[in-house]
Amino acid sequence: MTSVRLLSLWIIVIALGCDGEPKPPQPLVKPPPLTVQEWKALPVEEKYDEATFQRLREADKNLHSDRVWQKFMKDVILPERKIDIPGVPGQP
């Protein structure tokens, strides 16, 4: 009888896990802000993503202003895009 009880207990422990409670999912880690130099080194597929632009904007408090951000887009992002993706946007 003792071996049957031990076997039953062992099956219950395995079925429930060590503490019997599921672990909560780990929170997603927010990517750090990006400097312009780090942004320029990114692959093209990631470089022009909206989330990447947000990381770039977070790195410089001056870029939080919409007016300054638009100027930054015109002076930095668009010239870099012309280098990375030559041609007319939307055309093959």
Image (cartoon, rainbow, N blue to C red):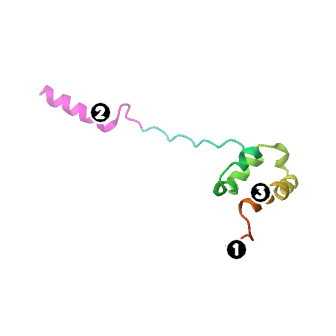
The image quadrant that residue 74 belongs to is bottom right
Front residue of this view, candidates 87 and 9: 87
The residue tagged 2 is: 13
* Cα–Cα span, label 1 and label 2: 61 Å
- Measured as percent of width and height from the top left, residue 65 is found at 85, 50
At 19% from the left edge and 32% from the top edge, which residue is drawn? 7
The image quadrant that residue 21 belongs to is top left
Q: Earlier in the sequence, mark 1 or mark 2?
A: 2
**Three-letter residue code for mark 3:** Glu
SS at mark 2 in the image: helix
CA neighbours of label 3 inside 10 A, class few (<14), some (14 to 19), many (20+): some
Front residue of this view, candidates 17 and 28: 28
- Measured as percent of width and height from the top left, residue 10 is found at 24, 31
Q: Which mark is residue 91?
A: 1
- Measured as percent of width and height from the top left, residue 88 is found at 75, 71
Range of residues picked out in magenta: 1-21
**Three-letter residue code for mark 2:** Val
Quarter in which the C terminus is drawn: bottom right
Q: Is residue 65 above or below residue 18?
A: below
Magenta residues, dominant SS class = helix
SS at mark 3 in the image: helix
At 72% from the left edge and 45% from the top edge, which residue is drawn? 38
- Measured as percent of width and height from the top left, residue 27 is found at 56, 41
**Three-letter residue code for mark 1:** Gln
The residue tagged 3 is: 80
SS at mark 1 in the image: loop
**Callout 1–callout 3 Cβ contact below 8 Å:** no
Task: Say whether residue 85 is left or right of residue 22.
Answer: right
